[in-house]
Amino acid sequence: MDALPGADDVTTRDLTEIITAISGTRQMDGGGRSCIVERSSEQTPDSQWETGCNLWGSPTMNVRLSLVIGCLFPALVTSARAADRMQFWNLTGETISKLYLAPPGTSQWGPNQCANDPDGAVDSDERLKLKDVAPGRYDVKLTDATGRTCIVRDVTVQGGKAYAFSLSPEDLKECSK
């Protein structure tokens, strides 16, 4: 499951504003604690408003806070997982036995990323976890199971997505055996 768009940008302040909008008006008491002022379910003239000034606000606030956290937490966790998950998706139709990345226009090839796979190769339509690769632009060098070596220039590697980059047969133009 992909992360919700913009989930990386949610801050504690955003969560506080969401919770305040759901629950009532937020105020600070003399001890610096956040208090929630909300309408009482009993509409008597003397108690139209009740204030909860414990650590999390009123008991009603605790329920609402639990609901908000319960809804947002999976999105935030998914977003964090997606950011950590840098994967190459092999759509070439061939098994790849070696895969290297280098800054564009250089021959400073990094480690063989196929070493990250349990069988040391990336089958067609398989995804490979990339290690020590940051989002950016790279030249990619690969060798397939037939011994053909190809270089694909200026590939965009993206973070926070279901996969960082993919290669298809159309991308394999600069090849030699």
Image (cartoon, rainbow, N blue to C red):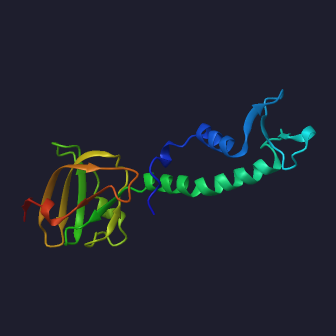
Measuring from the top left, give residue 4's x and y in whole percent.
47, 54
Residue toward you, 62 or 44: 44
Measuring from the top left, give residue 77's x and y in whole percent.
54, 55
Q: Residue furthest top?
A: 30
* Residue 97 vertical position relative to residue 69 in the rendered view, above or below: below
Q: Is residue 7 left or right of residue 140?
A: right
Q: Is residue 52 left or right of residue 106?
A: right
* Residue 91 vertical position relative to residue 135 in the rendered view, above or below: below
What residue appears at the point 61 percent right and 37 percent down from the top-left corner?
A: 13
What residue appears at the point 26 percent right and 60 percent down from the top-left corner?
A: 166
Measuring from the top left, give residue 43's x and y in whole percent.
87, 46
Q: For the N terminus, which image quadrant?
A: bottom left
Residue toward you, 48 or 22: 48
Q: For the C terminus, which image quadrant?
A: bottom left
**Quarter occupied by residue 124:** bottom left
What residue appears at the point 23 percent right and 63 percent down from the top-left corner?
A: 98
What residue appears at the point 59 percent right and 40 percent down from the top-left corner?
A: 14
**Quarter occupied by residue 93:** bottom left
Residue toward you, 167 or 18: 18
Q: Is residue 111 left or right of residue 64?
A: left
Q: How many marks?
A: 0
**Quarter occupied by residue 175:** bottom left
Q: Residue furthest right?
A: 46
Measuring from the top left, give residue 123's x and y in whole percent.
27, 73
